Amino acid sequence: MRFAVIGAGGAGGYFGARLAEAGNDVTFIARGPHLAAIRSSGLRVDSVDGDVVVTAAATDDPGEVGEVDCVILGVKAWQVPEAVRSAAAMIGPSTAVLPLQNGVEAPDQIAAALGRDHALGGTARIIGYRAGPGHIVHSGAAPTVELGELDGTRSIRVERLCGVLDDAKGVTATIPADIRVAMWMKFLLIVGWSGVGGVARAPIGITRSLPGARRLLEGAMAEVERVALAHGIRLPSGAVASTMAFVDELPTHGTASLQRDIADGQPSELDSLSGAVTRLGAAVGVSTPVNAFLYDALLPQESRARGEITF
């Protein structure tokens, strides 16, 4: 298959590299030193599942790529609208756009910009980050992708895409019965992990082991569950308990990308995570005090990273 990857970071870079390693035609959309490094030396992935360096096309101009079978969005959630606009030149009649960032709003943003026929739902689970130009590190968690049509049908294109992803080394891909539910389950996990980790500035092994921090994790997740149900998303019974069980199995050193961005003074996905919970909750009359606290506590750092305030 022919892929374009917009956002060659910890998720997009990893999955794109594995697809290229498997023989697929992959073009990375990147910028600056990262782009220069991929062009000159390939994209290097250091992984607990086996290292790889792939030679693949890379450009900062999507207009050079032409039509592709699938655009993978590996950008941060707040970058999705711009990324989708840039992807327009690569969209053919049957092109699918697969979002892999955190949050639950990307499919509707894709549909609004490009048409609902091009929008898939998707989630990715991986602990990875860009260590430097042309260099991705996968440090933990089995890399998995869930994808599906927004209407719940099991289409030929989704089955084909799932098979190609699943055939790649170091990738497990599945088609859940309801991709919206799968995305909200990931959302439930990452909202608590990101918010509590960002405030505590501690890895998951610490926040899950301290009673107060653990209560915050569970409280943030419980609010997501209530908001989801109020929006008609049928999360499975015991969603918070099962997610906390998953948290307890994560590598002790694991950190969420939001907390790494906050610690590095970079713009983060705060508005798309804790902020989205409070917005979506307010829309259906569900109170979200834990996520409001996490959002408000992190907002000064976020605003400084975006140049909105100085201190």
Image: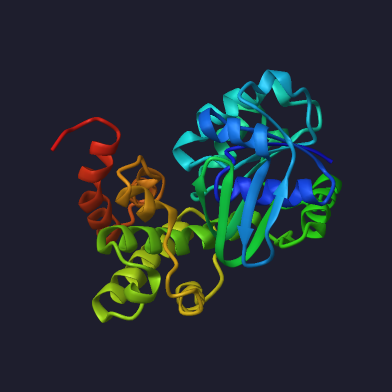
In-front residue for pair 82/239: 82
Give the answer, above or below, for where 90 lies relative to 203: above
Percent coordinates x, y for residue 129 in the rendering: 51, 52
240 sits to left or right of 206: right
Q: Nearer the viewer, residue 214 or 275?
A: 214
The answer to whether one can see residue 225 in this image is: yes
The residue located at (65%, 44%) in the rendering is 43
Viewer-closest of 293 and 21: 21
Specify the quadrant of the image occupied by residue 68.
Answer: top right
Camera sees residue 181: no
Residue at 41%, 60% (x, y): give it: 224
Q: Quadrant of the C terminus?
A: top left
Quadrant of the image occupied by residue 84: top right
Q: Is residue 160 above or below residue 63?
A: below
Can you say whether 11 is above or below 142 in the image?
Answer: above
Q: How far across and how far down the image is residue 183, in percent?
A: 57, 56
For the N terminus, the image quarter is: top right
Q: Residue at x 60, y 35 (%)?
A: 37
In this image, 285 relative to 232: left or right? left
Count of numbered badges drawn on the protein:
0
Q: Residue 20: percent from the left, percent from the top?
A: 77, 45
In this picture the colour scheme is rainbow
Which residue appears farthest toward the left when viewing the image? 311
Residue 159 at x, y percent in the picture: 83, 53
Compare residues 206 and 159 and report the one nearer the observer.
Answer: 206
